[in-house]
Image (spheres, coloured by chain):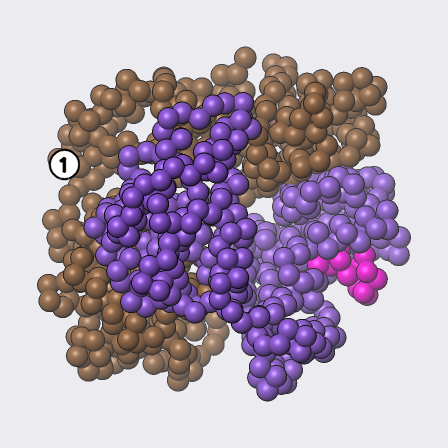
Chain colours: A brown, B purple
Amino acid sequence: MRAEIITIGDEILIGQIVDTNSAWMGEQLGLNGIAVKQITSVSDDAAHIVNALDEAQTRADLILITGGLGPTKDDITKKTLRTYFGMGWRTDEQVQADVIAIFKRFGREPGEVNMLQAEVPDGCRVIRNKNGTAPGMWFEHNGKIFVSMPGVPFEMKGIMTDGVLPLLREKFSLPFIYHRTVLTQGVGESILAAKIEAWEDSLAALGIKLAYLPSPGLVRLRLSASGNEQDIRRAVDAKVEELLPQIEEWHYGFGHETLPQVIGKILLERGQTLATAESCTGGSVAQAITSVPGSSQWYQGSIVSYANEIKIQQLDIPAELIAQHGAVSEEVAAAMAANARTRLGTDFAVSTTGIAGPGGGSALKPVGLVYIAVASANGVIVKRFQYGGDRSRNITAATLSALMLLRKVVLGHAL
Amino acid sequence: MRAEIITIGDEILIGQIVDTNSAWMGEQLGLNGIAVKQITSVSDDAAHIVNALDEAQTRADLILITGGLGPTKDDITKKTLRTYFGMGWRTDEQVQADVIAIFKRFGREPGEVNMLQAEVPDGCRVIRNKNGTAPGMWFEHNGKIFVSMPGVPFEMKGIMTDGVLPLLREKFSLPFIYHRTVLTQGVGESILAAKIEAWEDSLAALGIKLAYLPSPGLVRLRLSASGNEQDIRRAVDAKVEELLPQIEEWHYGFGHETLPQVIGKILLERGQTLATAESCTGGSVAQAITSVPGSSQWYQGSIVSYANEIKIQQLDIPAELIAQHGAVSEEVAAAMAANARTRLGTDFAVSTTGIAGPGGGSALKPVGLVYIAVASANGVIVKRFQYGGDRSRNITAATLSALMLLRKVVLGHAL
């Protein structure tokens, strides 16, 4: 089955918003065995929309349309689809009730213009929208399926997840596809690929596909296979078990887990606590940790010691240590972690000190040099990292490295 | 002049990457008076690319193509364009030199496959790529312009900014368009629109367009006009001057400025310093501040006091104050800011304490309640905010509110 995505709205064409919907839909369709052939973004213009619909159905069986369903005059998708399919209007009582319920949540009553969302082309199947007033609309025409959804990402995602994807699985015998995503940090795609080459070569014979999904500091490995559910689950899971020992150094989780989530889960189970002491990452480690709901149960806080005086006064780093080795040094990183652990009274503490750039570098201590330390009851471990990015990438990379080193110490893996 | 954008590459269609290039190009073209009619994403497939090129030139005068220029076999854009325009190959010596120079930067020598980047269709004009090995290529065909660029964002942006946009301005009498963007924080689009309604109504007669560009916590107002440079500069600037007093409460800057940049500039000029004491924002204010290059010149650090014990021990908040009023209270916020200022020895300190959610809320202190305080030589000011978002949005909103309140105190505007 092949799909195309049509996004409608001038705000994408003028660059006011980045279209994140299409990537999400492309991934979700792919996970269900449906390939996306083309993504087309067009303006709020009836003739242009019609042209895009005409072209899409020559290439695809499923056409997903987002945007242009707001209550204002410049939103013309619904009108255009009604005319395109030669349908009349009908009032959908379920949508009426949903619109009233949504306004009620905010203690308000819908206006006339909001109630118009319940007027739909009479030949379409309505797909409920839990998160907004514009319903999804499913049309079947010339053996093709067209689905219109609002462009607001969380509304579209709800309609896809609860309505469109289940309906597609019900109506078509989509292949069963099994995916597992293995998460790694601290290794580039090419080094990782070289390390697991033999393992990767063994996948083809089993019908398992491997995708490298890199993002700054991380590489996700996604294994996919389709066929008999029980067989492919067993085959993929066995291959993952085979992979893990080979990438132990870099592997930290599966699926959508994040490093702070993984660390927090362990600490919470054990009733242990964590503190941070950040220099070059400037609060970025604390921010990543506190983005996890419930992190207050295991995370105590941070001393962001951007200036040397703060290191001296708030972290008891001896001024002589800084004078002798420099603030960016193994010795200062170690003292920051050890003292943060003592001062904040936690089981673990992680510290960062380095040169994020663009200024502050030298021949001996170039931009991108970062020392990271973790203190625990077993002592302090320090590692040196040299990144090659701009300020923002160096901070991101150092933040991930700090969390990764912390995870290893927490698990007793780091030496 | 009308443009279309064609992005080539399976990674967009399968949702592996979000296409941010098209939004950037759409904005840049718009700023130069060129409207984008359609954005089309197609796979690495010659027939599909040719079809997209055929269709695009029926609607547009300028077709910008990104992606598919890597050195590997699955990148077929260059070959496809050469065949499409019926051209031969030639070796471009400038590109050869550029490829060698780029590898030299990393102390390496280009391989055979990298040198192939210098083979280009013989009828195209090469546009140099400072940031990578694949050059931009400019084709003129049937009175239309086609430009092919790599998909790597910073390579594409360099080629557009240094090559394509100047060439377009040189070859075509593009209208002179003058833009000014006024930045606001802490006000929603609808309240802002109501407040400046009369002013906004006066713009049309002067040929000035206004766009509201909202993002979480911020609304940017972009004024645009085209015509005689001197006249429209004067008209737009006068209207901006008229606007500012009406939005004084929310206005903080222009163009691409960020709140931490605006604050840092003032502090740096005055030789003043800043500290932060964060609870619910968990390091997010520190992170926003330290994302500014050179912030170490005016930012000292933060006490991220996530746990009450850290507030008590590292910020000298009396335990009785927390017991009496709760950690999320006006009193604790004020004490956090005052004590951070004293302990870290800075001119200003800003604090946050609140309930980011999803847990921790109550009827009296619901999720989204945040107290923000700023301490200065003139004393401490505290404000109460109630946000209605999820954890991530509440943290973002509180971070921006904290920076905005800080800016007002620094400027002596806050009471």
Query: What residue sits 64% from the left and 79% below the top?
Result: B196
What are the residue bounds of the magenta stretch?
B404-415
In this rendered view, identify the residue nearer to me: A202 or B311: A202
Residue B36's place in the image compared with A301, above or below, is below
Query: What residue sits 18% from the left and 79% below the top?
Result: A87
Residue A400's place in the image compared with A49, above or below, is above
| Residue B405 colored in magenta in the image | yes
Q: Position of residue B295 (x, y in %)?
A: 73, 43
Query: What residue sits 77% from the left and 52% below the top?
Result: B265
Q: Is any part of residue B39 visible from this angle?
A: no
Q: Where is residue B375 in the image (x, y as percent from the top left)?
A: 81, 52
Q: Quadrant of residue B388?
A: bottom right
Q: Mark 1 points at which residue?
A: A227
Q: In which quarter of the image is residue B242?
A: bottom right
Q: Report whether B136 appears left or right of B346.
A: left
Q: Is any part of residue B206 visible from this angle?
A: yes
Q: In which quarter of the image is the C terminus of chain A?
A: top right
Q: Where is residue B225 in the image (x, y as percent from the top left)?
A: 58, 75
Circle 1: residue type: Gly
Q: What element carries label 1?
A: loop
Residue A344's place in the image compared with B206, above or below, is above
Q: Report whether B12 appears left or right of A284.
A: left
